[in-house]
């Protein structure tokens, strides 16, 4: 495009951006006209490609009607055709998740195994950040020691060193390495640790349209068209009181599709969350909440569940397109909470999305106290600080746990009411990051105990009673637990036994532990065995009702 065309293109895209969340007859016709105009300017320069794609993805999530939806799809299709024809363009867009572009990143052992299984022979080693000595030591651990010659030969990089050992034409370097690790005598935790020590950066190219960021989708729920302007009032009390609908009945394929979209969405952000990486097909729940908003909840596989909390992740979808992700760390009626709105969806329905999330966690999981850690609103997070994320949470009813900061916020709120142009300076916003933010939905919220405090008590107990010897502590406490339960655990599942050993440390710091366990035998047994149920919901609800436990830890 020439200079004049560039100016016209910018005018069109800027105008479309300004109209994204405006829904009425006048703006609807203007959007149609601008989409036709935008099509006439394709192909475009590489620097304009990503913003244009983001604009179209938002329009697909927020269509006024079928005509605008179809036009946005056609325009997106025309945009994507550029990637099939121009290698230089796809190369310049590396790391974005667009079709024909490459991903190079360091992921966890579990995530890499997922990628290799999903995309066989496509994911390979790009490089490794570990030292040559570390690489030699790990190969020595994994391979027969009689192969020491090639293990220690020269100052080669990891890829070259692996090629010395791999004789298979069916496996690439990464697949060979994963096979060797899995065939070793190491347990799963040690396998993951060894892999992470290598500091591997993988290389993978997006070959299939359905796997690209442009076409990641959730379950096929009905499309919602915006025929009226967005309601930005978002009365939190009204929204959270609305009765939650029954979960959507998902088949296995739909659950797998949600897991795939969640994992790939974060892959293209170069991030991971444990409930996505360790997603359990049996623990996926989807709520269709109206206005095109749906929320998918993700529980982890049994071996990856937390001991004292339930970490439940979520993916928010707008018209089946991923729009937000995060999670809640539930312990009793308390949940630490985190939210990330994807860039294309900021400025739209962020307020409504978080209200719906709190509604789901409140009604489905029984959470009555939400806690937001300082990072979410500015601690070591410049973007959140500058955007005044603190006030985003404050408007919803969150308040600082620290009483002096709560008073400061109240005074600032009064200043805002007197002067609509009043704005908190950065130094004040930084002060708020010295405290958690808390939203309490019930004056009788109980239990709302912080599991971190309980974890610290257990450490103190081990150090004070067993001189820090954790093996002796666990053996003693596990024997005491078995005596208190007065049952044989021969018929217990392996995962229940492993969990019981860990929990024994928790039950046994009570002064009269054996008698306490005996008195509450039925509930203690359920506490242990429900953790390995298909979903974590029964465990969460049982723990909330286990009053004697909360009295003990307090």
Image (cartoon, helix red, strand yellow):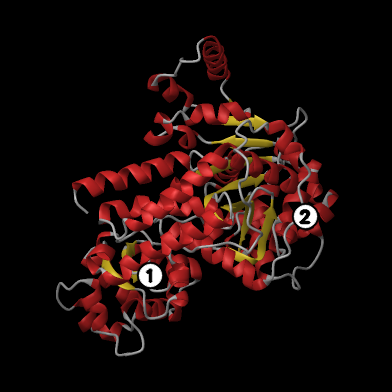
- Disc 1: which residue: 206
Q: Position of residue 417 (x, y in %)?
A: 56, 13
Q: Which image quarter: residue 472? A: bottom right
* Disc marking residue 246: 2
> Where is 371 relative to 294, above or below?
above
Under circle 1, the secondary element is: loop
Q: Position of residue 540 (x, y in %)?
A: 72, 51
Instruction: Please report contact status of discs 1 and 2: CB closer than 8 Å, yes or no.
Output: no
Q: Position of residue 466 (x, y in %)?
A: 57, 48
> Where is 328 relative to 371, above or below?
below
Q: Position of residue 509 (x, y in %)?
A: 67, 44
Residue 442 in the figure: left or right of residue 90: right
Q: Distance between the Cα atoms at labels 1 and 2?
A: 36 Å
Task: Return the residue nearer the eye: 81 or 455.
Answer: 81
* Disc marking residue 418: none
Q: Residues within 10 Å of mark 2 (few under 14, many from 20)?
A: few
Q: Residues within 10 Å of mark 1 (few under 14, many from 20)?
A: many
**Residue depicted at 37% across the width and 46% down the height:** 13
């Amino acid at each position: 495009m020439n200079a004049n065309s560039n100016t016209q293109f910018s005018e069109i895209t800027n105008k479309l951006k300004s109209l994204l969340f405006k829904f009425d007859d006048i703006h609807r016709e203007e959007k149609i006209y601008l989409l036709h105009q935008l099509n006439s300017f394709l192909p475009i320069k590489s620097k304009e490609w990503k913003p244009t794609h983001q604009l179209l993805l938002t329009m697909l999530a927020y269509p006024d009607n079928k005509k605008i939806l179809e036009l946005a799809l056609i325009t997106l299709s025309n945009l994507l055709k550029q990637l099939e024809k121009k290698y230089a363009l796809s190369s310049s867009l590396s790391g974005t998740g667009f079709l024909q572009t490459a991903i190079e990143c360091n992921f966890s052992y579990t995530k890499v195994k997922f990628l290799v299984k999903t995309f066989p022979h496509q994911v390979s080693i790009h490089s490794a950040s570990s030292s040559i000595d570390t690489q030699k030591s790990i190969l020595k651990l994994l391979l027969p020691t009689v192969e020491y010659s090639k293990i220690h030969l020269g100052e080669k990089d990891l890829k070259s060193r692996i090629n010395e050992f791999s004789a298979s034409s069916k496996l690439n370097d990464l697949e060979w390495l994963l096979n060797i690790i899995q065939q070793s005598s190491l347990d799963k935790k040690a396998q993951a640790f060894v892999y992470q020590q290598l500091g591997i950066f993988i290389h993978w190219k997006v070959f299939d349209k359905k796997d690209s960021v442009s076409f990641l989708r959730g379950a096929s729920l009905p499309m919602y068209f915006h025929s009226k302007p967005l309601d930005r009032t978002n009365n939190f009390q009204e929204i959270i009181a609305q009765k939650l609908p029954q979960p959507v009945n998902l088949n296995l394929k739909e659950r797998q599709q949600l897991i795939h979209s969640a994992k790939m969405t974060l892959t293209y952000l170069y991030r991971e969350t444990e409930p996505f990486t360790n997603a359990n097909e049996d623990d996926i729940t989807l709520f269709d909440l109206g206005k095109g908003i749906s929320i998918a909840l993700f529980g982890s596989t049994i071996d990856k569940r937390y001991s004292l909390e339930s970490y439940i992740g979520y993916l928010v979808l707008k018209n089946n397109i991923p729009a937000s992700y995060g999670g809640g760390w539930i312990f009793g009626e308390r949940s630490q909470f985190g939210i990330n709105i994807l860039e294309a969806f900021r400025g739209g329905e962020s307020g409504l999305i978080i209200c719906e999330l709190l509604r789901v966690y409140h009604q489905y999981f029984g959470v009555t106290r939400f806690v937001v850690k300082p990072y979410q609103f500015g601690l070591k997070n410049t973007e959140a600080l500058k955007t005044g994320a603190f006030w985003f949470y404050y408007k919803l009813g969150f308040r600082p746990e620290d009483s002096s900061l709560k008073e400061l916020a109240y005074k600032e709120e009064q200043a805002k009411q007197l002067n609509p142009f009043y704005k908190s300076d950065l130094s004040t916003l930084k002060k708020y990051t010295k405290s958690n933010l808390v939203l309490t939905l019930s004056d009788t919220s109980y239990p709302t105990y912080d599991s971190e405090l309980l974890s610290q008590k257990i450490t103190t107990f081990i150090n004070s009673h067993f001189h820090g010897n954790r093996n002796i502590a666990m053996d003693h406490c596990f024997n005491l637990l078995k005596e208190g339960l007065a049952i044989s655990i021969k018929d217990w599942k392996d995962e229940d036994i492993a969990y019981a050993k860990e929990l024994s440390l928790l039950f046994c710091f009570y002064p009269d532990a054996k008698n306490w366990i005996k008195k509450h035998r039925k509930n203690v047994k359920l506490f242990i065995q429900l953790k390995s149920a298909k979903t974590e919901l029964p465990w969460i609800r049982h723990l909330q009702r286990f009053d004697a436990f909360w009295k003990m830890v307090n």
